[in-house]
Image: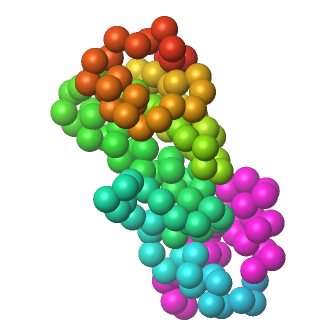
Amino acid sequence: MEEYRKKYEEWRRNPFFDKETQKELEEIEGNEEEIQDRFYQDLSFGTAGLRGILGAGTNRMNRYTVGKASQGVANFIKKEKREKDGVVISYDSRHMSKEFAEETALCMNANGIKAYVFKNLRPVPELSFTVRKLRMYSRCDDYS
């Protein structure tokens, strides 16, 4: 069995994945090209971060791929012993951006890393400024 097919079957049958995800994957059963495209690789970071098509699969943007990437960042922060520094998380107007920001904050919190999340949309330069200054907490929610 092809490796992408094994990943597809795991996502489809593992109760870890929510019902909506499993339903979406059930709907593509038999469409080998679609299954392969969703599972032939893990979504990877580019110059603009983690981006991709929304949907179920390892090669799609979803709460599981965002969670996996967030855990990788958390592992690095912990390895560097920088948990107390915390992270600042923002989001924009793209679909699921707020939900992905919240997923990231929860992952950081589960790893003992303080996460500050803006209460609403912010332009990228404001996030950049906040990361440098870390003095705008009154405009952020503390997820700790």
Judge from the rendering whether residue 50 lies leftward or rightward of residue 20; answer left or right: left
> Coloring scheme of the render?
rainbow
Residue at 44% over, 24% down:
115
Q: Main secondary structure of the magenta part?
A: helix
In the rendered image, the vertical position of residue 55 relative to residue 32, given as above or below: above
Residue at 39% over, 64% down:
44
Q: Which of 70/134 is in front?
A: 134
Q: Which of 10/96 is in front?
A: 96
Q: Quadrant of the N terminus?
A: bottom right
Q: Is residue 42 visible?
A: yes
Judge from the rendering whether residue 52 lies leftward or rightward of residue 96; answer left or right: left
Judge from the rendering whether residue 112 lies leftward or rightward of residue 38; answer left or right: left
In the rendered image, the vertical position of residue 71 relative to residue 113, given as above or below: below
| Residue 117 in magenta stretch | no
Question: How far from the left and from the top, in percent, is residue 140?
Answer: 51, 17
| Residue 7 in magenta stretch | yes
Judge from the rendering whether residue 16 lies leftward or rightward of residue 124; answer left or right: right
Residue at 65% over, 64% down:
55
Question: How far from the left and from the top, in percent, is residue 141?
Answer: 54, 17
